[in-house]
Image: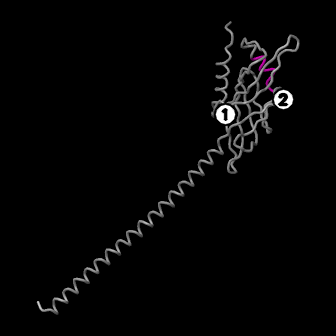
Amino acid sequence: MPRAAAEAAEIRRRRLRLLTLGEILAVAALVISGLTFWNSYEERRHAEADKVASSTKESRTARTLVLSGKADKDGDRLTLTALGGQSIQGQTIAFPAALDLSPIDSSDPRIERRWIESALVDALKAAGEKTKAGGDARLPVAITTHFYVDDTLVDDVALYDVGYTTSSSFLGGTDVKLKGLSLIGHTTAAAAQKRIDATWSARHKAPAK
């Protein structure tokens, strides 16, 4: 092969090699760009998912209501507050059927001794229980609380124990003093009354006749 032809062939081979290398670099750049875009997309997607999950968790937390009750020094009243800081708009408090009390609606979150004292003492006597000083007793109640979550009024229905003590005197009868409030569990409006009745019955067996 003449020298000029050989040089021309060599130049073509070099150009082909350079072209192939350029194509490889271009493809590599395209792949890297694609991976960078995908990573960016995945990061945004995960960030949005985390944001939604966080928002959902916050909403669930806001909707979960737990009440606490603080008694005044004489045990006449429990002031109820939401541990999560929710603003209570009103409440309905239902009592075991054994007390023969109608549910009480209140815009001021509280439980008063005068609401339950006489009916509670009568129900305890009907169950054959003697009231005595010392030791805490528990009265199951169902509390429906109305409060706002994200500008929406929602209801929470839960069973609570009202802690109380009793004391008796020969002439003065039986006194009840309120002590506090503890959560039994959340429930539905349809099941609330049955559950507090069942809880009362399990704790206070009526005497056999």
Residue drawn at x 35%, y 75% is 26
Can you tell which of label 2 and label 1 is closer to the viewer? 2
Instruction: Name the residue beneath numbered marker 2.
Output: 73
Q: Is residue 90 above or below residue 138?
A: below
Quarter of the view holding residue 184: top right
* Image coloring type: one colour
Queried whether the magenta region covers residue 120, the answer comes back as: yes
Q: Amino acid at mark 2?
A: Lys
Name the one closer to the observer, 179 or 130: 179
Name the one closer to the observer, 48 or 189: 48
Q: CA distance from mark 2 to mark 1?
A: 26 Å
Left-right relation of 12 to 91: left
Quarter of the view holding residue 190: top right
Q: Position of residue 149 (x, y in %)?
A: 68, 47
Residue drawn at x 41%, y 65% is 35
Quarter of the view holding residue 147: top right
Q: Which mark is residue 21?
A: none
Q: Is residue 157 above or below residue 204?
A: below
Instruction: Name the residue beneath numbered marker 1.
Output: 158
